[in-house]
Amino acid sequence: KNAYNSSISNRFAPLSKDPGSISDNHPSKSSEVRSENLLKSKRPQGKLKARPETLIVGDSAVKDVQRMCGKNTKVLCFPKDMVNNLKERILQIADEYPTVMNIVLHTGSNDVSKQQSEVLKRDFTGLLNTVNSLNAAVFISGPVPPVRRGDERFSRLFTLNKWLISACTDHSVMNRLKRTHLK
């Protein structure tokens, strides 16, 4: 017989016996049963990690949001991503989190600096078309106009967010701005 064919025993069994027990070289029957039950158990040992129900995905604006969220929310921050980058990765992200029921997308801030409004609208339309296939409620949180960045940037962002309201409606996607007075 080789070493692999020998019987399995619990090397800690002597520690669980009463002192002065007669059979010190063989594990007790109760420790054999315990070991066998642990081997048969299909349940993973240790605490199961909760899967998120809500996913917040966005640019640098969401980087510190996780600490304000509960355990059922996962925040994924891609600081340099643009709308088109998010469109490319959102399906894979959704596949990695099958328990997600709500997805909040905050993107567009990095795109605005390129000053190509029509390209940005086309990229958002592509993103909206992509998220329509997801099995979750999707919310778009467009770029927020920064304080002290000038009237032109504010105007550009204001116009983009007004356009996003109608684009999200057309694609059956919620937009955080629907509840504000921008209408």
Image (cartoon, rainbow, N blue to C red):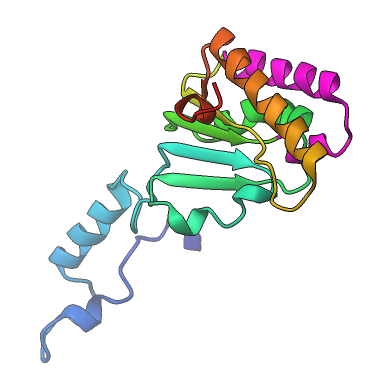
Location of residue 134 in the rendering, given as x and y in whole percent from the top left corner: 53, 19
* Whether residue 125 is situated above or below residue 64 in the rendered picture: above
* Whether residue 24 is situated above or below residue 154 in the rendered picture: below
* Whether residue 31 is situated above or below residue 79 in the rendered picture: below
Look at the image and tell me in which quarter the C terminus lies: top right
Give the magenta-colored segment's residue range: 108-132
Quarter-of-image position of residue 126: top right
- Residue at image location 49% in from the left, 63% down from the top: 3
- Residue at image location 51% in from the left, 31% down from the top: 103
Q: Is residue 128 magenta?
A: yes
Q: In this view, does 46 lie to the left or right of 114?
A: left
Q: Which residue lies most toward the top here? A: 170
Location of residue 155 in the rendering, given as x and y in whole percent from the top left corner: 75, 33
- Residue at image location 85% in from the left, 21% down from the top: 119
Q: Which residue lies most toward the bottom here? A: 20
Quarter-of-image position of residue 7: bottom left
Q: Please tell me which residue lies in front, 41 or 90.
A: 90
* Whether residue 7 is situated above or below residue 41 in the rendered picture: below
Q: Please tell me which residue lies in front, 64 or 12.
A: 64
Quarter-of-image position of residue 132: top right
